[in-house]
Amino acid sequence: MKEEALLTVENLKKYFLIEKKLNKRENVFLKAIDGVSFTLHRNEVLGLVGESGSGKSTVAYNIIGMYVPTDGRILYKNACINGKSENRPLSVKRDLQIVFQDPSTSLNPRRNIRYILERPLKVHRITEKRSIRDRVIDLLRMVELPPDYMYKYPPHIGGGERQLVSIARALATDPKLIILDEPTSALDVSIQGKIINTLIHLRETLSLSYLFITHDLSLMRNVADRVVIMYLGKICEVARTKDFFENPAHPYTMMLLSSIPTMSREEERVKPKKIRSRGEIPSPVNLPTGCRFNTRCPKAKDICFECEPELREVALDHGVSCHF
């Protein structure tokens, strides 16, 4: 049975103008994402992984409607939703929600948690007025916070609790897809496990789909169904999680996997052979010709500096953008 596509991204591009010239052809652009395509299926967790500057958060901001794509299409349930969030149908706004990396900047410090959770309920007219307080309590309980937290303010609670409030706010509209933009990277290690366990539980009980953005590959092993690796605005590799960890194919992927710390000999045994990158990450303003990883790849040949590789399928549900 063919899996149902919930979100489809087709050849997505986002360029930022950083220097304007008299001749438009000479304008200088930062190519944050440059031809990204992937599909996220219903009830799936898709991990979008890459180093800082790879463009993964820019992908999220285009999908959620904070940015307008330079080119390409974003399809939700086969309907194009390109453009700003305020111009989208109300049903799409409800279905697509985002949890940002730092809850201290995404939650209003001058409003209590009750107000923060009530706001989407009132804006989308999801709950009758007399039932709003009960719904707020339900949302807090869903993320394992006590009801009396509704009277607290974000600065007066811990970072992990603030992130749980952010997740509760995203759940208020009964979404189908939640974009998680590095939801644990700003938190202590001791808190990260609770957040991840909460997200897994919510996915199972509410039949949610996640686009999980992170730089932590080890996290994806236990969370994601499939993994997409990005580098300088392009997709290097995409595969089901098990195949990805057992049979990595792109040199950049191997480099990332070989750098993951291990806790046992068994983990060390299944790691790819150590690949050391050379050089520095190129600027997205002045990209190398050919393969974008050629300046750091120990396996680069002449063709890697001349032709940009296309993403091609090397096994079932396993695509790689590499000449070799």
Image: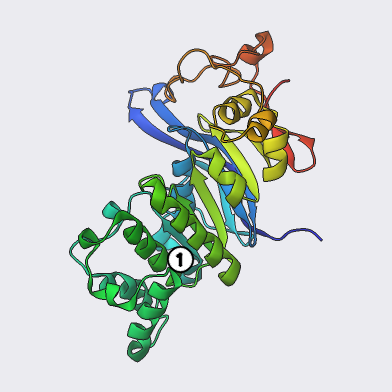
Instruction: Locate residue 187, reporting x and y percent.
Output: 36, 48
Instruction: Locate residue 234, reporting x and y percent.
Output: 56, 32
Specify the quadrant of the image occupied by residue 194: bottom left
133 sits to left or right of 266: left
User: Residue placed at 43% from the left, 68% from the top?
Assistant: 143
Task: Count neighbours of disc 1 (C-alpha within 10 A) and say few if under 14, some if 14 to 19, many if 20 or more.
Answer: some
289 sits to left or right of 190: right
Q: How many marks?
A: 1
Q: Is residue 231 above or below residue 99?
A: above
Compare residues 215 and 197 and report the one nearer the observer: 197
Q: Is residue 224 above or below residue 49?
A: below
156 sits to left or right of 98: left
User: Residue placed at 49% from the left, 20% from the top?
Assistant: 287
Specify the quadrant of the image occupied by residue 49: top right
Q: Residue furthest right?
A: 1
Q: Residue furthest top?
A: 302
121 sits to left or right of 274: left
In what element is the residue under mark 1?
Answer: helix
Is any atom of residue 33 visible in this view? yes
Q: Quadrant of the C terminus?
A: top right
The residue wearing badge 1 is 93
User: Residue placed at 34% from the left, 29% from the top?
Assistant: 18
* Circle 1: residue type: Lys
Q: Quadrant of the N terminus?
A: bottom right
User: Residue placed at 59% from the left, 16% from the top?
Assistant: 297
